[in-house]
Image (tube, rainbow, N blue to C red):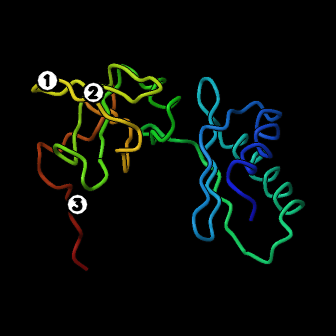
């Protein structure tokens, strides 16, 4: 398989031609994971078109004997933050961060992302703010507030859902 940066350069035009934006691309062992989005959100029809286009494109350029699985999806509501532009776009959002081992302070923090630039980003926490460099981050993602999203749930008065079954 070709290098990740070369792969990004290869798929960007194909994704853009279908009206989508390349959010992220990762190569993991045996998997090429592509996250795409578009203004207003991505739909399953576009995801299918992107999948077919990228599958054909990768088959043409990959002459290695390596087998891989192509995964194409949206970044989701609780989208991962891996690149500087992801952090910049998420300013004002609640985020959850896990730092790499050896980073000073708590390894897991959650707060509001207030700044992001070339050097790193800052999160407002309950007890102040904390700055991070991008290389200190093992994993980061947006935290979606399901309670304020107008999501309706079944009212079961806090108990488990039950159903009566008639005896035969």
Residue at mark 2 = 123
Tell me the number on the disc at residue 21.
none
Image x and y of residue 25, in percent: 62, 48
Q: Position of residue 57 (x, y in %)?
A: 85, 54
Please, what secondary structure does the residue beneath circle 2 have? strand
Find residue 35 and report its horizontal and vertical position in percent.
60, 45
Residue at the location (64% across, 40% down)? Answer: 36
Mark number, residue 163:
3
Give the Cα separation between the discs numbered 3 and 1.
Answer: 48 Å
Q: Quadrant of the C terminus?
A: bottom left
List the residue tagged with mark 1.
Answer: 128
Of pointers 2 and 1, the one earlier in the residue sequence: 2
Image-based side of 63 in relation to 150, left or right: right
- SS state under label 1: strand
Q: Residues within 10 Å of mark 1 (few under 14, many from 20)?
A: few
Between discs 3 and 2, the one toward the N terminus: 2
Tell which circle, 3 or 1, labels the residue nearer the N-terminal end.
1
Q: Is residue 10 left or right of residue 133?
A: right
Residue 134 in the image: state x and y as whole percent: 41, 38
Is residue 79 positioned above or below 112 on the image?
Answer: below
Residue 14 sits in quarter: top right
**Measuring 78% from the left and 33% from the top, which residue is drawn there?**
16
* Dots 2, 1 in contact, CB < 8 A: no
Q: Secondary structure at mark 3?
A: loop
Residue nearest the observer in this picture, 58 or 117: 117
């Amino acid at each position: 398989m070709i290098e990740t940066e070369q792969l990004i350069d290869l798929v960007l035009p194909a994704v853009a031609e279908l009206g989508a934006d390349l959010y992220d691309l990762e190569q993991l062992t045996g998997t090429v994971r592509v996250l795409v989005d578009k203004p207003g959100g991505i739909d399953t029809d576009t995801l299918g078109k992107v999948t077919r286009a990228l599958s054909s494109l990768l088959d043409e350029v990959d002459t290695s004997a390596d087998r891989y699985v192509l995964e194409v999806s949206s970044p989701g509501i609780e989208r991962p933050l891996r690149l500087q532009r992801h952090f910049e776009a998420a300013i004002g959002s609640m985020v959850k961060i896990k730092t790499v081992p050896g980073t000073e302070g708590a390894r897991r923090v959650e707060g509001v992302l207030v700044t992001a630039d070339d050097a790193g980003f800052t999160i407002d926490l309950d007890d102040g703010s904390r700055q991070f460099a991008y290389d200190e981050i093992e994993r980061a993602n947006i935290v979606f507030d399901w309670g304020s999203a107008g999501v309706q749930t079944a009212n079961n008065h806090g108990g488990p859902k039950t159903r009566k079954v008639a005896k035969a």
